[in-house]
Image (tube, rainbow, N blue to C red):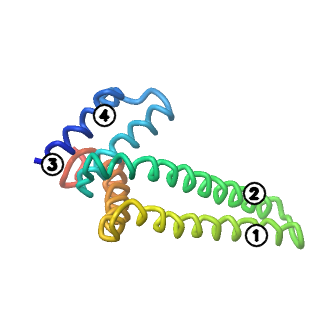
Amino acid sequence: MKKIFTILTALCFIAVTGTAAQPKNREDWKQKMMNEKIAFLTTELNITPEEGQVFWPVYNKVNQEKDAAMRNVFKAYRNLAKATEEGVKGKELEKLLKDYLNAQQAQREVEEESAEKFMKVLSTEKTAKLYLAEEGFRRRQIHKLHHGNNPRGHQK
C-alpha cells in the first residue's frame, strides 16, 4: 500500500509540474529529467512521505553542490584544452593543469560529503541504494537516448 501511495505521489508531482509535454528548451528538459528522476528514486528507494519531507531538501541541496562542482571541472577542462590547442607552455599551462586537477578533487570531496549528508537522513542501506538507483537512472536515460523507448534496444 505504501508503495502504491509513493508511486501515485510521484506521478501526481510529475502531472502537476506539466512534464508530460515535450520539453521546449533546456530548462524544460532539465526539469523533466529531474521529475523523472524523483519518481524513479522514490520508487526504487521506497521513500515514505515522512522520509521524503526530510530527504528531498537534502537531496536538492546536494544536487546543487554536485552541479556546481561539475561545472567547475568542465570550465577548468575547457581552459586547459584551449591552452593546449593554442600551444601554451610552462608555468601558465602548469597552473591550468593544477586548476583542472583541483576541480576534480573538489568534485570528489563533494561526492564524499554527499554520502555523509544522506546517511544523516536515510539509513545506510537506503543511501547505498540511492547511489545504485542514481546510476541505474543515468544508464536508463543513456539507453533511451541511444535506443528510444524500445526495451530491446533496437531501432525500429
Assign a secondary structure to mark 2: helix
In space, the residues marked 2 and 3 are separated at their CA atoms by 49 Å
**Amino acid, disc 1:** Leu
Image side of residue 18 versus residue 88, left or right: left
Q: Residue 14: which disc?
A: 4
Residue under numbered circle 2: 79
Residue under numbered circle 1: 97
Give the mark nearest the N terminus, 1 or 4: 4
**Amino acid, disc 2:** Asn
Circles 4 and 3, Cβ within 8 Å, touching? The answer is: no
Give the mark nearest the N terminus, 1 or 3: 3
Question: The C terminus is located in which quarter?
Answer: top left
**Amino acid, disc 4:** Ile
**Amino acid, disc 3:** Lys
In space, the residues marked 1 and 4 are separated at their CA atoms by 42 Å
Q: Residue 127: which disc?
A: none
- Mark 2 is surrounded, within 10 Å at the Cα level, by few (under 14), some (14 to 19) or many (20 or more) other residues, namely some
Q: State which quadrant residue 136 falls in.
A: bottom left
Above or below — where is 95 with respect to 77? below
